[in-house]
Amino acid sequence: MVGNHSADDRQTPTEELVVVSNREPYSHAYADSDGGGDSDDREIEVQRPVGGLTAGLDPVMQRAEGTWVAWGDGEADREVSDAEGRVRVPPEDSSYTLQRVWLDDEEVEEYYYGYSNQVLWPLCHGDVGNITYEPRFWQRYESVNERFADAAAECARESDSGSLVWFQDYHFGLAPAMVRSQVGDETTIAQFWHIPWPSWESFEVCPQAHQLLEGLLANDLLGFHVDPHCANFLECVDACIEGATIDWDAGRVHHAGHETAVESFPMGVDAERIERLAGSEEADDFWADFRDSQGIAEDATVAIGVDRLDYTKGIPERIRAVEHLLETRPEYRGEFVYVQKASESRSRIPAYQQLQREVEETVERVNERFGTDDWTPVVGVTEMLPPESLYGLYRHADLGLVSPVRDGMNLVAKEYVAAQVDNDGALLLSKFAGTAQDLGNYAYAINPYATEEFAETIHEAVTDSPTDRKRRMRQLRQLVAAYDLDAWMDDIFGTVEDLRGEGETDSGSGERDGTGGIEGQSAEADGGNV
Ligand code: GDG
């Protein structure tokens, strides 16, 4: 297990690191974005990552001094980039290059809102009913993958010491093979797929199942959050790719003269930072103001849910469980408040508009049914909160309700745990979130569809003895702190290094270029099972 490390023993690839993601780590916007004034004299401000992977990778990129390839979607991005779309970041102390890829409106519509989010997203979450397929989506996905692949391959070719190209997520199902065809075996290609991989029974409905699997098998390392997603992927390769041989135990696929390692790395969060911010004065001040402004009584039992408004997150199911609790256990009326922090997401897509309406209607119904002049059972928050405020909400909420119907991991569950600096919260966690593989033993397990049981589990968590709740929370906090975001990255970089070692032994070359290793202590590539 990798964990509890200091800043000095973190791994940074010494070869050129090229990260490819859809979202960029820094975007540029006009300070007065009301559209007024001449763009020549308008002030430009930099927007930074607020959390999660992008914020976590930024310091790694600063140490590695590599290149980050991403869609330049900021309105002032072109103005600050050179003719090739490059800009040095971070702005105050530049240490790496952000290579922007420009996408026009049609490309965004068809590649991002189309194939990525109306085909692959529902497909991978096993929700085939929400798939909307159009041939133009696929054509655009292919051509945009080509654009990102060209940019990544060019960066890889510029390095004398070999490169590691690291793709993030489902927006790039074809790009690994496109890069491989340009750079050959000298470049290591890895990818992390942040969402689930479905069974073959679900995946085979995809018209491009074969092309996507071929694209991904060009990776040297393909990572998923948890073992069942790796097993599903191997099952799909077995069913669809003729001539591929699979080592099921080791998680290796041999195909077309190339080996791909398929392994799990359960992503973590920056637990130390969350704990620090959750315990800050700003977090307490936000909570006090929030409680006052929402009329939440000081002794109320508060539960929180934090999600993008997405149909995979089980938001209406959760509110219905709260409704059932209030219906069957009247003692909670006037005493229990559920805070739903939901940020708008992908709202150009009809399924997301429909979900938004459903959530609004469900909240309204529960509040009309049970609410009184001085008590609102369900409080909705839609604005994006700064990290201190979000962690303040987590810290002061008695219960964290995390009930996705399907989720690759779900970082909110881990953030809620990291923010429990007094060890006094309780986490209710869906069996269908990847996080359940890590935290399932100590969280209160729920099935989001089983409304009555879900409501009873809320009651159980509230009425359990404080000693039992604290015991569970202490265990959860240890797990979240031990395998944090840095440990996750170390684990991946360590595995890349091990694989390269294996490749060198296999080919008998012994040495590749003398600089192709990774600095720091070697991580144990154990798939991160904590
Ligand atoms: C995908 C996979 C996987 C939300 N509201 C605010 C805010 N957030 C942040 C949370 C959390 C993030 O958004 C949401 O992350 P999740 O992991 O819960 O979900 P997805 O966005 O669907 O992410 C998922 C993840 O990729 C990583 O691999 O876990 O399974 O679906 O970090 O904190 N942050 C701030 N203010 C808000 O109002 N600052």
Image: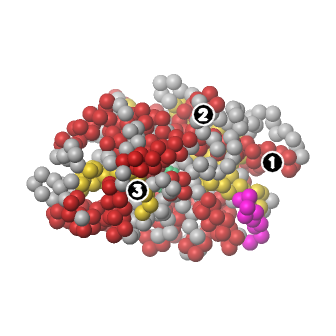
Residue flagged by tag 3: what amino acid is it?
Leu
In this figure, which residue is indicated by the disc labeled 3? Answer: 428
The answer to whether residue 385 of the structure is visible from this angle is: no
Closer to us: 243 or 436: 436
**Is 245 inside the magenta-drawn segment?**
yes
Predominant SS along the magenta part: loop
Distance Cα–Cα, label 1 vs label 3: 42 Å
Above-or-below relation of 349 to 467:
below
Give the extent of the magenta segment: 242-251
Tags 1 and 3 touching, CB below 8 Å: no
In x, y percent, where is residue 374?
12, 51
Q: What numbered label is drawn on residue 470?
A: none
Secondary structure, mark 3, is strand
Q: Nearer the viewer, mark 3 or mark 2?
A: 3
Residue flagged by tag 1: what amino acid is it?
Glu
Is residue 361 shown left or right of residue 261? left
Above-or-below relation of 443 to 8:
below
In x, y percent, where is residue 317?
34, 66
Q: What numbered label is drawn on residue 502?
A: 1
State which tag comes first along the sequence, 3 or 2.
Answer: 2
Distance Cα–Cα, label 2 vs label 1: 26 Å
Q: Quadrant location of residue 387?
A: top left
Label 1: how many Cα within 10 Å (few below 14, some 14–19, many 20+): few
